[in-house]
Amino acid sequence: MANELEKQNAAAAAMEFVEDGMTIGLGTGSTAKYFVQMLAEEIADGLVVRCIETSEQTRRLAESLGVPLIPSEQIERIHLTVDGADEVDEHGFLIKGGGAALLREKIIANASDHMVVIADPSKQVERLGKFPLPVEVTPFGYTITAKKVYDALCSSGIDRPRVELRAQPGGRLVMTDGGNYILDCHCQRIPDAESLAARLSNVPGVVEHGLFIGIARTVIIGNEAGATVFE
Ligand code: 5RP
């Protein structure tokens, strides 16, 4: 179980990248939540920033804390995005989407001048793949898409993958903010994340996948005493 202090310290270290006048992408999840809360405190103390949320969950949090949000269609430039991750490797490649927000997270992170990942040490891995890779798919034809996703996993050297439609504990299917489904791809080990990312992007019906390749520029790993920043 991740230590909340580790997450808080990672978020606090990310605050060092915030400057007056910035437009900031707000990530989703329990680590990103600390960043939004810290940002709200600075805003209350006079910091002037505008933000864009990566999920309905984060929109509700930001609104409740008085963090100013701008609609995505009014965005011209995003200076900084701070978000969590489910796994991060030594290249700064990520698995994201544990909270089903990967589509908006990727749109915002990819459009940002600078993406900072904040995480506790349990997210650091030598090789991506222990955490099931989320893939967002359209409801139409999702069983067909799931088979093609399975084929893409096998073609990328993944041994006996398992593709599961994400459901809530009661059995109801998880629906993303965009009205899509999530396939959780159990890989155990992804030998070549870049080639898998390319293969998944080529499957019709795949809206987006949770591999973030070459998007994060800074990774901050919190610990109980502070945080380590990897550039
Ligand atoms: C949501 C995400 C989150 O950033 C990821 O799941 C990490 O969340 P947490 O900080 O709660 O561990 O990708 O889609």
Image (cartoon, rainbow, N blue to C red):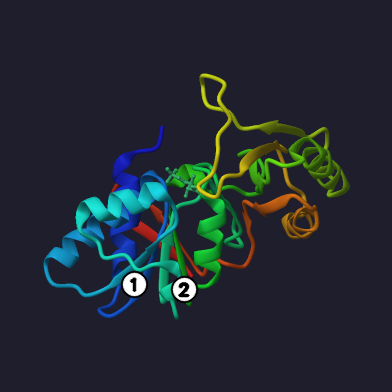
| Depicted 133 relative to depicted 143: above or below | below
Spatial CA span between label 2 and label 1: 9 Å
Q: Is residue 183 above or below residue 18?
A: above
Name the residue beneath numbered marker 2.
114
Quadrant occupied by the N terminus: top left
- For the view shown, which residue lies furthest in the front direction? 140
User: Mark 2 is on which residue type?
Assistant: His
Q: Are marks 2 and 1 in contact (CB under 8 Å)?
A: yes
- At x 53%, y 49%, the residue is 124
The answer to whether any part of residue 226 appears in the image is: no
Instruction: Report the residue that reaches farthest toward the left.
Output: 45
Instruction: Judge from the rendering whether residue 154 lies leftward or rightward of residue 28; answer left or right.
Output: right
**On the image, which quarter does residue 47 sit in?**
bottom left
Instruction: Kindly tell me whether mark 1's CB lies below 8 Å from ligand 1.
Output: no
Residue 6, given in percent of the width and then of the height, sits at 34, 46
- Number of the label disc, if any, that sits on residue 68: none
Q: Nearer the viewer, residue 27 or 2?
A: 27
- For the residue pair 64 and 164, the one nearer the viewer reads as 64
Please name the amino acid that badge 1 sits on.
Phe
Where is residue 50? Give x, y as percent.
30, 71
Residue ID for mark 1: 17
Residue 224 percent coordinates (x, y): 30, 46
Q: Residue furthest top?
A: 170
Residue drawn at point x = 50 percent, y = 46 percent:
123
User: In the image, what residue occupies the spot 35% across and 53% down?
Assistant: 59
Residue 141, percent from left and from top: 77, 40
Q: Is residue 26 above or below residue 176?
A: below
